[in-house]
Every structure is written in C-alpha cells, then in structure tokens.
C-alpha cells in the first residue's frame, strides 16, 4: 500500500469535515438575514419604536454584512483566512447573545451591525476555505452543497423565525446561534486548514473607500425605500457612496497591489457572474420579504403558518442544488443559470396571476416548486462559475466581490419592492396588501428575468472558464493558474 493510498481516507475525512463546518456556519449567518422578518411585530411590542426602527432592525445586519465582505477577504489573505474566519465566527456568536439581551431597540440595531460584521468574515472566507480544500474538477459539486445550504437558509428564515417566535419568544432567534456558533468555532480552530492569499501591502485608503462607499450606497437604498428616493439625505448618501467607490476604482487601477485586481473584470464570465449574482439575490430576497407580508397581513396567516407555506419553494434547493453543481462540472454555468432564472421569473409571474384571482393556497404549490427548481439550478452554478473564472491565488478576493454584490442585491431588492408596494397598496387592509403585493412580486420576477439575460454573457464549459481566467490576470497569477488547468485536464 502506497503512502498516497494510506493518506487518502484521512484527506477525505478532513474534506468532509471542512464541508460540514463551513456549511453550518454559512447556514447560520445566512439565516439571520431573514429570520427577523416574522419576529418584528413581537420585537416591536417588547422594545417599542416605529416602522423605521423595525426596518433598521432587519436591514442593519445586511448593510454591515455587505459593507465588510471585501475588507474581510483582504484581511484573510494577509493575516490568515482561518484566523479571520474564526474571529468573525466568534464575533457573530457574541453579538447574537447581545441581541438576545438587548434592553432597547437602539442597542438591538447596534448589535445587529456587529453581527453583520462577524458574518462578513464568515461568508467569503468560509467559501474560500471550502473551495481551497478541493481540486477544481470537484468545485462545482462542493459549491452546490454550500449554495444549497445558503438557499435553504434564505428561504427558511421566515419559517424558523415564526416557529421560534410563536413557540418561545423573539429572543430565541438569537439565542439559538450561540451553541451552534461555539461548536462551529471550536471545530474551525482545530480542524480547518490555514491558508493565505498574496502577501500584499494592506491598502488602508482602499479599505476606507470601499467600506464607506458600500455602506453609504446600502444606507441610501434602504432610506430610499423608506423615506422616498428624492429625500435630500438619501440622494446625498447615494452620491457620496458613488464618489467613494469611484475613488476606490481609481485607486485599484493605479496601485501596484490592488485589493480587487480590475483584470478580474476583463474576464467576461466573471463580470457576468457579478451582475447575475446581484440580480438573483435581489429577486430572491425581494420575493421572500414581500410574500411573507402577503401571507401574514394579506391572508391573515400566523407567522408559523406563513413559514410553512414557503416549503414548496424552500425545500427544492436542498434537493436540486447539489445535482446542479455536479452538472456544472460537466456542462458549465450558462446552460443551467439562464433557464433556471427564467423558471423562477415564470413561477413568480404565475403567483402574481393567482393572487389577482384570489386563488386558494393549493394552486400556489406548482409555481412555487417551479421557482424553487429554477433557483436551485442557478445558485450553485453562478458562484462556481465566478470562482472558476478567477485564479487560485485570487479566490478570496473573487469570493469577497461576489458576496458583496449578493448582500447589496438583497438590500436593493427589498428596498425596490417596498417602494413599489407603497406606491400601489398599503398595510391598512388585506385588500391593500394584495394590491401592493402583485406589482411588487412582478418586480421580483423582472429582476430574475434580467438576471437570466445577464447570464447569457457567461462562457460555456468549465475548461473555457479556467483558461479564460489565465488570460485575464497578470504575471504571477498565470503561473499559479496553470497548475489548476493541468489538474482540471487530468494531466
């Protein structure tokens, strides 16, 4: 028996444990993006505050999450991905306990910001640690599992939040994170393998520009959906954010060691992935948010019942996302993502028609399943295509960029459908909720369809993805990538 044969079971066990540990943490931080939705009325009764307070309780987490991702990925490359990942996981767990103990709405919002900063370290670095543990030819299947878990967490957030709030109290949507986070942190400390990215100089001006720019843009989108898009504070925030991001792009184009090499965007597939990820996330979060309001306030369902009604949509990622990842390894992303997002758009459009005719819930099951299968085909393939289009040495930066756009897309989608809802309906009556729900979900369908159009720019086939990445990155990255090409081709 050769040494390679003897070490193979140990390597496989380590890889399986890496999948388990990172997937559990991924589920936890992704779940917290929407688990608060069905708990907001209970939080309001306990801590007080108005509508603005409740909206910030929901969006403060996503805002800091999205604003911190690129910075966390850069710190992970420099100081160690496992080290920064573990710091983020510990921060998230401690902040969850603080949220559960918060005596006021203001402190709860502040602790939600801290939660989001912890999640910003866990999400991109968890994906990077996971993909680095596997060869490129298996990456699609592994990312399929990862994204299947994330998709389930996103869609099951209202169900979990409703069950915990109705069965115990709103505090338990945060307390439940504590034991899970402790176990995941211990496992990460002793079982995940440390890795580093390029040891580039830490660019503090770039870190400041991208963090402030993303934070202000997200704040502007949230405020626009709440106070009106023409409000002075909203316009100022968005304009300042755009100026800061323009300064960041200029900095990246002129510095010899950029945080995000702009050559990544010269790759057609990577640029398409970034746009598709944004639109796909906007569609998913928008639909989950507005449909939860429709079930509870339009149809009079309890939080738990509303969550249960999502199951035909929420169960499909767990079933179909892993096989979609395997198919990606064979056929590439475009042939799965384009029809997948089109299917989700069609499912949402069907639900809009059913709501207009006041149909019973049984008639919603088939379009929910169609939308769920569609997004299950798309989620793992978009992420895998983006990582396959980047060189191995830049996986952390590529994952950070993709995940930043995912979180920004989520906030953008919720803000847009909220604005559309307010223009066509109201929360004053079930009829008003239904009137606002139909055009709002129609917008979510349109975002999904636009994502399908954007995905047409992806290259077909995986070998083309890896080879094209080599042509789009400078000098030292080509050498590192050539090894991935050799492995992928079996040489």
Image (cartoon, rainbow, N blue to C red):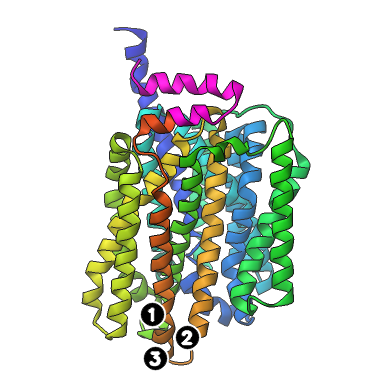
Q: Which residues are magenta?
A: 467-491
- Asked if the residues shown at circle 2 and circle 3 are in contact, with their CB atoms under 8 angstroms apart, the answer is no
Which residue is depicted at the point 48% across and 62% down?
A: 282
> Tag 3: Cα neighbours inside 10 Å, few (<14), some, or many (≥20)?
some
User: Does residue 359 appear left or right of residue 450 in this picture?
Assistant: left
Label 2 to label 3, Cα distance in Å? 11 Å
For the N terminus, the image quarter is top left
Looking at the image, tell me whether mark 2 or mark 3 is earlier in sequence order: 2
- Asked if the residues shown at circle 1 and circle 2 are in contact, with their CB atoms under 8 angstroms apart, the answer is yes
Residue picked out by circle 3: 431
> Tag 1: Cα neighbours inside 10 Å, few (<14), some, or many (≥20)?
many
Q: Which structural element holds mark 3?
A: helix
Q: Which structural element holds mark 2?
A: helix
Residue picked out by circle 1: 438
Residue 474, picture quadrant: top right
Which residue is depicted at the point 69% across and 49% down?
A: 210
Residue picked out by circle 2: 424
């Amino acid at each position: 028996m050769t040494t390679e044969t003897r070490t193979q079971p140990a390597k496989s066990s380590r890889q399986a444990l890496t999948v388990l540990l990172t997937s559990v943490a991924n589920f936890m931080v992704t779940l917290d993006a929407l688990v608060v939705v069905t708990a907001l009325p209970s939080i309001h009764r306990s801590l007080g505050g108005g509508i603005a307070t409740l909206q910030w309780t929901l969006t403060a987490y996503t805002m800091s999450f999205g604003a911190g991702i690129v910075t966390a990925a850069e710190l992970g490359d420099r100081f160690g991905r496992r080290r920064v990942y573990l710091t983020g996981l510990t921060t998230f767990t401690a902040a969850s306990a603080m949220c559960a103990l918060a005596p006021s709405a203001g402190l709860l919002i502040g602790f939600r910001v801290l939660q989001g900063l912890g999640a910003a370290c866990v999400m991109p670095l968890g994906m990077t640690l996971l993909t680095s543990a596997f060869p490129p030819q298996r990456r699609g299947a592994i990312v399929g599992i990862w994204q299947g878990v994330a998709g389930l967490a996103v869609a099951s957030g209202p169900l979990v939040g409703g069950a915990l709030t109705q069965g115990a109290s709103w505090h338990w949507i945060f307390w439940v994170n504590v034991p899970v986070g402790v176990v995941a942190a211990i496992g990460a400390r002793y079982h995940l393998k440390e890795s580093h990215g390029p040891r580039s100089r830490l660019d503090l001006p770039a870190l400041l520009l991208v963090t402030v720019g993303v934070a202000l843009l997200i704040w502007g989108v949230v405020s626009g959906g709440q106070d009106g898009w023409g409000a002075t504070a909203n316009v100022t925030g968005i304009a300042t954010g755009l100026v800061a991001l323009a300064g960041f792009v200029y900095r990246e184009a002129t510095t010899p060691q950029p945080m995000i090499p702009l050559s990544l965007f010269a790759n057609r597939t990577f640029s398409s992935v970034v746009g598709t990820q944004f639109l796909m996330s906007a569609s998913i979060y928008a639909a989950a948010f507005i449909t939860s309001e429709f079930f509870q306030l339009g149809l009079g369902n309890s939080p738990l019942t509303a969550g249960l009604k999502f199951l035909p949509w929420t169960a499909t990622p767990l079933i179909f996302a892993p096989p979609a990842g395997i198919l990606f390894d064979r056929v590439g992303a475009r042939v799965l993502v384009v029809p997948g997002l089109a299917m989700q758009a069609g499912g949402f459009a069907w639900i809009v028609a059913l709501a207009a005719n006041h149909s019973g819930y049984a008639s919603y099951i088939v379009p929910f399943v169609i939308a769920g299968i569609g997004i299950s085909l798309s989620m793992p393939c978009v992420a895998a295509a983006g990582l396959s289009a980047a060189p191995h040495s830049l996986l952390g930066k590529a994952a950070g960029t993709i995940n930043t756009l995912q979180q920004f897309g989520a906030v953008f989608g919720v803000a847009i459908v909220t604005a559309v809802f307010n223009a066509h309906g109201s929360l004053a009556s079930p009829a008003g909720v239904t009137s606002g729900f139909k055009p709002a979900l129609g917008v979510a369908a349109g975002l999904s369809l636009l994502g399908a159009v954007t995905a047409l720019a992806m290259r077909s086939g995986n070998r083309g993805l890896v080879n094209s990445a080599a042509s789009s990155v400078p000098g030292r990255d080509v050498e590192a990538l050539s090894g991935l090409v050799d492995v992928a081709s079996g040489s």
